[in-house]
Amino acid sequence: MMRLVSLAGAFRALVVVGSVLALSSCIDAAAKRTTHWDEYYARTNTPRAHVQVVPPEGTTLPMAELIAEYVVSHLQREKISAAVGDGKASDGQYFILTGLAEENLTDPHIRYHHVLRWVLTNANGQVISTYSHGVEGTDQEWQFGDPRLLSAIGFGTAGPIAKMILAETKATVPIDPLRRGLLVEQVSGLNDENSAHLTRAVADALRTSDVFVTGDPRQASFRLAGHVDVARADDGFDDISIVWRVLTMDGRELGNAVQENRLPWGAVEGRWTELAPSVAKAAAVGVEHVFGTRAGPPPGAPERARGEPPRIVLPGEPGRAPPPPQ
């Protein structure tokens, strides 16, 4: 089982009994409360400026409107608030993007049949910057508004324009906490050899999840401390618990993830080398959930998963594993 505890939310633990170390999590209503990192994700997902995209001149009105709509869509993916507009100046802190579509009818050395020349201004009409985008595609694709052509226009325009806007507004992109440096400390509670195996396995699992793991305290913003406890229980079983604590460099705890189970006496003795990769894989998921995130799309993206960690089943004694989940 895995139990996750953050500053403002928790996962309720379930007891898993068997000779297989099963690591899982159960999410209750508390898990849906805000976490320590919600403010960070809110900043990342908040549009940093607003752009009014005017349908470009030099082409048919339907095509111009389609181009504007695709540019708006791709600007929104860049976390820039955008909408199709008429370009009329008014009060407010926002930008206006106007454009002109030109056909290349004379120069055979230019591979683009059409060029879009964009002008970015502020709400008062002051020119901020200009950008020209060569459109690859046939005349037929242009005339019929081919979706792939329009998507290429949106993508090719939104990136440079977004950079111009961010530079103009001096907006900064928050750093993903999982990329700020995590120092994995030696796991305690095991002998030196087993501790080294588990520590190395956890660091490798976190790196696989694109966490910036470092051995240099000068490059780290957080520390990961792990402790293994094996306690003799009744009826021939051991209670095994592994606690992973995420700390600031000055020792303040941000949250923790707990893996625990009840196994037959001595079931893990001499097996830590074998078990370490599976234990570490599940631990990495738990550590990421302490930060309110896990591997996947960029932080703040709507599709970024924040759900239940997967169940991880470690090797057990033949014939004694619990039945598969129904």
Image (cartoon, rainbow, N blue to C red):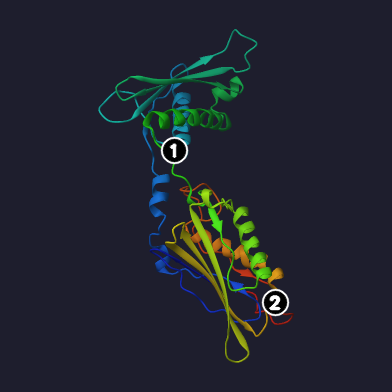
Q: Which residue is mark 1?
A: 76
Above or below: residue 305 compared with residue 114:
below
Above or below: residue 6 compared with residue 133:
below
Q: Residue at x 31, y 25 (%)?
A: 123
Looking at the image, tell me whether mark 2 or mark 1 is earlier in sequence order: 1
Q: Which residue is mark 2?
A: 316
Instruction: Report whether 99 appears left or right of 210.
Output: left
Q: How far from the left and from the top, in percent, is residue 134?
A: 56, 20
Direction bottom: furthest residue: 235
Q: In front here: 84 or 312?
A: 312
Q: Residue at x 33, y 30 (%)?
A: 94
Mark 1 residue type: Gln
How much space separates mark 2 and mark 1, taking CA atoms? 49 Å
Above or below: residue 12 compared with residue 62:
below
Instruction: Report whether 303 appears left or right of 7.
Output: right
Direction top: furthest residue: 106
Which image quadrant is residue 193 in?
A: bottom right
Q: Can residue 72 be seen? A: yes
Count neighbours of disc 1 (C-alpha within 10 A) and say few if under 14, some if 14 to 19, many if 20 or more. some
Which image quadrant is residue 1 in?
A: bottom right
Mark 2 residue type: Gly
Count neighbours of disc 2 (C-alpha within 10 A) and say few if under 14, some if 14 to 19, many if 20 or more. some
